[in-house]
Image (cartoon, rainbow, N blue to C red):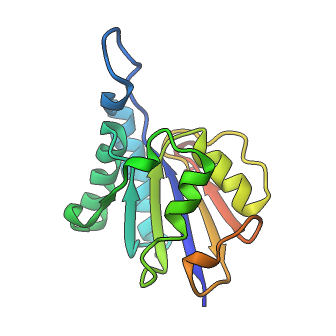
């Protein structure tokens, strides 16, 4: 049995403005088109999620909504997890080991630098930077998410809008 984790960085966002909270930054038009492109690519590769976990920040919520629209997934089924925003590596690991066990394919939509740290930790590869809308696919030969540990993941691929 395998588990499949898709680590997805939110799409391209507006620069933070004076008096604006980072949490409230929205997507730029390019962000909308990039997220749409990645979602369509995942469909073409037959990667539809069983579950989506997302940071509740505006930019990740908007990215998740685009994925749901393109993939015909009910937006209400997304799990918005506060711990993903400004997450430490440990916070993300704690989340993953508690993923819904019935889910084989999980999308995790969040932020750098924590997503890069997570991908590096799980695969022992060096993903120096994950650009906006960048997606890392990691496969695990495990039966339960709780079995996740350092270096156990196999980096299948990394895709970015510029690569497509």
Q: What is the tally of numbered marks visible in this picture? A: 0
Residue found 39% across the figure and 76% down from its top:
50
Q: Residue furthest top?
A: 18
Q: Position of residue 111 (x, y in %)?
A: 50, 41
Question: Residue at (41%, 71%) from the top-left corner?
Answer: 49
Return the residue nearer the eye: 99 or 42: 99
> Could you tell me residue 4's position as x and y percent?
56, 74
Q: What residue is rendered at 46% in x and 69% in y?
A: 106
* 17 left or right of 139 in image: left
Residue 10 percent location from the top left of the image: 44, 43
Q: Is residue 141 above or below residue 53?
A: below
Q: In this picture, is 62 found above or below 96?
A: above
Occupied quadrant, residue 32: top left
Q: Which quarter of the figure has residue 112?
A: top right
Q: Where does the image place residue 35, in percent across and percent down from the top left?
A: 39, 48
Answer left or right for 140 relative to 97. Answer: right
For the point 42% across and 43% down, the residue is 34
Compared across the picture, whether 123 is left or right of 57 comes to right
For the view shown, which residue lies furthest in the bottom direction?
1
Quarter of the image that includes the N terminus: bottom right
């Amino acid at each position: 049995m395998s588990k499949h984790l898709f680590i997805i960085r939110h799409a391209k966002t507006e620069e933070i403005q004076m008096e604006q909270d980072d949490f409230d930054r929205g997507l730029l038009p390019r962000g909308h088109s990039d997220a749409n492109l990645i979602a369509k690519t995942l469909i073409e590769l037959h990667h539809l999620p069983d579950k989506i976990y997302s940071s509740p920040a505006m930019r990740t919520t908007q990215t998740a909504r685009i994925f749901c629209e393109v993939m015909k997934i009910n937006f209400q089924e997304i799990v918005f997890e506060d711990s993903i925003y400004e997450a430490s590596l440990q916070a993300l690991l704690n989340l993953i080991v508690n993923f819904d066990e019935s889910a084989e394919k999980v999308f995790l939509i969040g932020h750098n630098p924590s997503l890069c740290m997570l991908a590096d930790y799980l695969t022992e590869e060096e993903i120096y930077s994950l650009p906006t809308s960048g997606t890392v696919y990691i496969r695990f030969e495990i039966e339960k998410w709780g079995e996740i540990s350092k270096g156990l993941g196999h980096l299948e691929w990394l895709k970015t809008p510029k690569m497509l």
